[in-house]
Image (cartoon, rainbow, N blue to C red):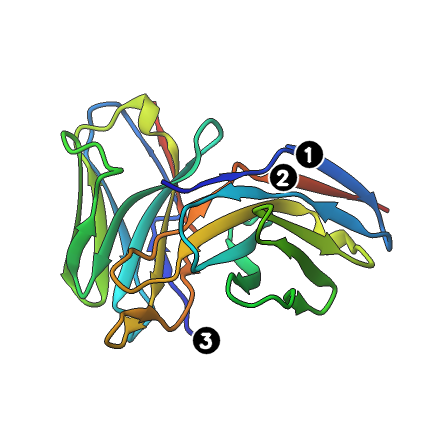
Amino acid sequence: DARVTQTPRHKVTEMGQEVTMRCQPILGHNTVFWYRQTMMQGLELLAYFRNRAPLDDSGMPKDRFSAEMPDATLATLKIQPSEPRDSAVYFCASGLVRGVRGSMNTEAFFGQGTRLTVV
Amino acid sequence: AQTVTQSQPEMSVQEAETVTLSCTYDTSESDYYLFWYKQPPSRQMILVIRQEAYKQQNATENRFSVNFQKAAKSFSLKISDSQLGDAAMYFCAYRSAGGAGSYQLTFGKGTKLSVIP
């Protein structure tokens, strides 16, 4: 049963601490998205990778957020230093894009999210 | 930039009845996809139904169907024979069709659906 795995499921941390969230995309998927969900803003795209290369991270606050894909089986989202306004649910999603025109062959599958609370 | 609007923050329906959730969107593109996602209390985002803009026929998946009005940029979800397990947040979403474009989803703010026994 292929699924996107996110760890941890829940994280409570103090303001100023570093937070790292991890995502294991579905094997064979070459596109990874990070979304953030808050009550006020809803679901927003933070970053987007294709074949491990960042294609769009315009939604991410660059001063404190960073996203990487060290290898094809791991995507990370790091916040340093964390602030109370970062409290949200962070979703990772993966999909497969291929073909000359880059058509998306599968829709994005979402992980169960990491609920982050910064106190 | 594309925008997606869900004007109903909350809806309720009696079990076994039918309910329709509304969604409108704004885009200058002619080729795109529209989706409805369900998010139950478990937080898992579950794809309910997908519509390709170039297809005139409305998509259906069992008890779920859509009314896609391309000219009006409207995309509503109809749930027939509502069940208790349908209670969740429902998100309407838009994605470009690809090519040189990106593949991220643009979401509406969601509609919370309650099902009354």
Label 2 Cα crowd, 10 Å radius (few <14 / some 14-19 / many 20+)? many
Give above or below for B14 relative to A23.
above
Specify whether disc 3 shares its chain with disc 1: no
Relative to B70, A97 lies left or right = left
Observer-side mark, 2 or 3, equals 2
Q: Nearer the viewer, mark 3 or mark 1?
A: 1
Point out residue A94 in the picture as x, y percentages from the top left corner: 34, 62
Q: Is residue A114 above or below residue B98?
A: above
| Chain identity of mark 1 | B
| Local secondary structure at mark 2 | strand
Q: Amino acid at mark 3?
A: Asp
**Which of the two labelled residues, at mark 1 and mark 2, occupies the earlier sequence position?**
1
Give the alpha-carbon distance from disc 1 to disc 2, as whole Å: 5 Å
Query: Pointer 2 indicates a residue of which chain?
Result: B
* B97, A41: nearer the viewer: B97
Q: Residue at x 23, y 46 (%)?
A: A77
- Mark 3–mark 1 Cα distance, whole angstroms, equals 33 Å
Residue B7, position as x, y percentages in the image: 62, 33
- Asked whether the beta carbons under mark 1 and mark 2 sit within 8 Å of each other, the answer is yes
- For the residues labelled 2 and 3, the Cα–Cα distance comes to 29 Å
Q: Chain of mark 3?
A: A
**Which numbered circle lies on residue B111?**
2
Secondary structure of the residue carrying numbered label 1: strand
For mark 3, give the secondary structure: loop
Query: What is the quadrant of residue B51 in the picture?
Result: bottom right
* Image point (37%, 30%), residue name: A87
Q: Are marks 1 and 2 on the same chain?
A: yes
Could you classify mark 3 by the number of other residues whose Cα lies within 10 Å: few (under 14), some (14-19), or many (20 or more)?
few
* Labelled disc at residue B10: 1
Task: Tell me where residue A5 sits by quadrant.
Answer: bottom left
Tell me if residue B20 comes above or below residue A49 in the rendering. above
Q: Label 3, on which residue? A: A1
